[in-house]
Image: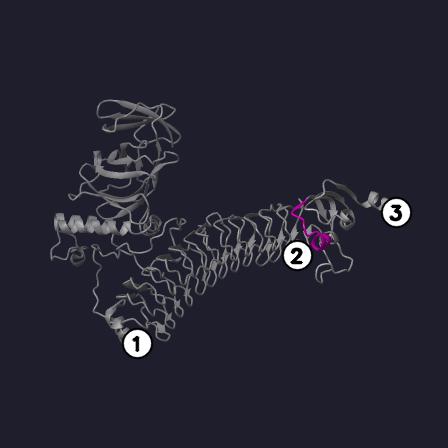
Amino acid sequence: MRKLFFMLFVAATLLTGSALTINNTAGGLAVAVNDNTAVTSLVVRGTMDARDFLFITDKMNEITSLDLSQVTIVPYNEGRALYGTVTNYQGNAIPRTAFFGKKLSTVTLPANLETIGFAAFAGCDQLRGITLPATVSMIDDYAFAGSGLTSVVLPQTVVYMGKGVFARCEQMTTATVGSFVLGDFAFLGDTNLSNVVIGAGVNYILKGAFNGCTALKTINLEQATNLSRIDEEAFINSGLENITLPAGGIGTIGDWAFAQTQLSSFYMADGMTQLGEGALAHNRQLTAVELPGLDLDSNPSGEGVHNQGRPKKAATPIHTLERIKDYTFAGDTVLDARYLLKEDVAYIGNYAFYNVSAAMDTMRLPSSISYLGDYAMAGMTGMATLKTGAAEVPALGQNVWEGVDQQSVSLFTPSNDIANLYMQADQWMYFYIPIQTDYTLGDVNGDGHVDINDVTALINFVLSGEGSNVDLRAADLNVDGHVDINDVTALINYVLTGAASKSLHRAGAEWGARFAATADQLDIQTVILRPGETRTVDVTLTNDEHAYTAMQYQVVLPEGVKLLKVAGVGRGENHTFYVRQHEVEENAYDVMGVSTAMAMFEGNEGLVLRLTLAADDSFSMTDAYVQFVNVLLATPVDAYLSADVLAKVNDGSGVEEVASSKHVTGVRYINVAGQESETPFDGVNIVVTTYDDGSVTTTKVVK
């Protein structure tokens, strides 16, 4: 009978003294292995159920290598409790604690596996890697906790993760997450985890997922386009220094989600409705935060959030966040919160800005603010100015400005009449409330903004002495009692300084909301540049809709390329171009071209300016572009937003070598039909470039 049993149910082949290959029928592994429980390597084929796993759990303590790739796990339900009190065991599932604490170093899982049970591989500290089949949909609590895994890939098929699945995996360095959800405490305390990729399939990052991941310096969530929620304590006490959030925004960020990190900046896109209690508290390196919503004012000085790597933002902001909860920014001692609060914020919770930025001198409150909680701005000892847009005095909790010398802080309100209300209100009354002016320095035309329109209005006034809309108090930039060309120069510098101190995207969002669009545009001609070279690049202007006298734009260059000079040529030879290195974006420059004689860019098309570029030896031509962004074209009375333009840098291969000392005198475009134009046709163009020494080059480009 014993021989017949083996023939019908189990065929076992002994390979070596420590390796077995078993052709198994569910429930027969114990008989097949028999006295070989000390084997270190086991290959199982056929079927298995919970009884077979229990045999490995209880008897095979020396196993280090397990191959289940050719196994199908079948259900077992005979009313017998095998693991704890569980009596019903599903098919395609590894039972709870099946390999808990085993010496396993390699495991190959069944190809059709669906579920990995509670603590199934927990404590397997020799296990360095494992491949999860694309059929896995559920991973239970602590499945791999305390294991020796160094990396893991979670497939998109995973729709459920329990708590602490990879918690305390101190050897873990890399994780690629495609699962629908990243469970509570998923990587808790994984102190060597430094590389995390979050895929498009991830919808939720749950509580404490990366709590204590001190080696995690950066994480890019840009591809996580479906991510809608980051739960409480998700990144608390991690090593995060940089984070890029998805362009579509995240609806909810939970309590203390990013507290006690090394973040220096944090940008939240439109669409977020909940920012949890203490969400960004105690971040000692945090200098800049941008919330969703509309800015409080035009920010004419350009001061504000300096944040790189931000996703693109809608031209018209969505007003979403209404509450700043308790402790949200508490202890962020170097945070510049001047422009942090946006319109629609009505409530500031207890200790929300406690001890924020001793170096920050100005704080702004939106017109929507109605309440500030207990100790909301206590310890803000660097504050010298508080500006509020609220026409009704907001209610206050206890000791809102504890520790602040309020008598030395100037409180500015919407008007002198409203200031009287603040003078009579508890706690507010202790601020110094000065008589307020009704103009903004630099806002020459009185439209509430300081921009290129004010520059053209001031130039026109200086030239003609006329201009009924010119506010002479605002026009006296150097405050010498006279309005003259010196104020024009000061205003140009003022506007460029403001543009240079805000991100390109922030500027684009503001200008997109304020300026009408035009189809007129600049065009960057062929760019030929190699490492170590200095070249000139010509720019043309097509203006059929309006006649312009000034322009402002931002130039973005490839890494390793510097902008040496911008000069007016051709139609722009009467214009002076002012250049300022951008303060926020790397390798970007702010440029304004004006004529102090109010000269127009004559004609409707043709060359207006020339860039001089220098490439160092680090410059790579691979996917390198010269870009003009946030382009404003100004008439004597108004400015219009033109489309961004870019041109790919090429090395001139197949083109006659052009000495850097030559200058372009003309550019023609010829399409496949033989038609010629001074602007490129859609599709393939032959570019014919003529130089001042009479030489001509041709190259092919595609628009």
Pick whichever of labels 3 and 1 is earlier in the sequence: 3
Tell me which amino acid carries mark 1: Ala
Give the mark toward the camera: 3 or 1: 3
Verify CB contact (< 8 Å) between mark 1 and mark 2: no
Tell me which amino acid carries mark 2: Thr
Q: Quadrant of residue 610?
A: top left
Give the mark toward the camera: 1 or 2: 2
Q: Which residue is mark 3?
A: 1
Query: In the rendered view, does 41 fall on the left or right side of 267?
Result: right
Q: Residues within 10 Å of mark 3 (few under 14, many from 20)?
A: few
* Disc 1, SS: loop
In the picture, the disc for residue 425 is: 1
Pick whichever of labels 3 and 2 is earlier in the sequence: 3
Of the pair 620 and 308, the residue shown nearer to us? 620
Q: Residues within 10 Å of mark 1 (few under 14, many from 20)?
A: some
Tell me which amino acid carries mark 3: Met
* Residue 373, position as x, y percentages in the image: 38, 71
Q: Which residue is mark 2?
A: 97
* Residue 89, position as x, y percentages in the image: 72, 56
Residue interval drawn in magenta = 54-67
Q: Is residue 595 magenta?
A: no
Instruction: Identify whether 317 is placed above or below 438.
Output: above
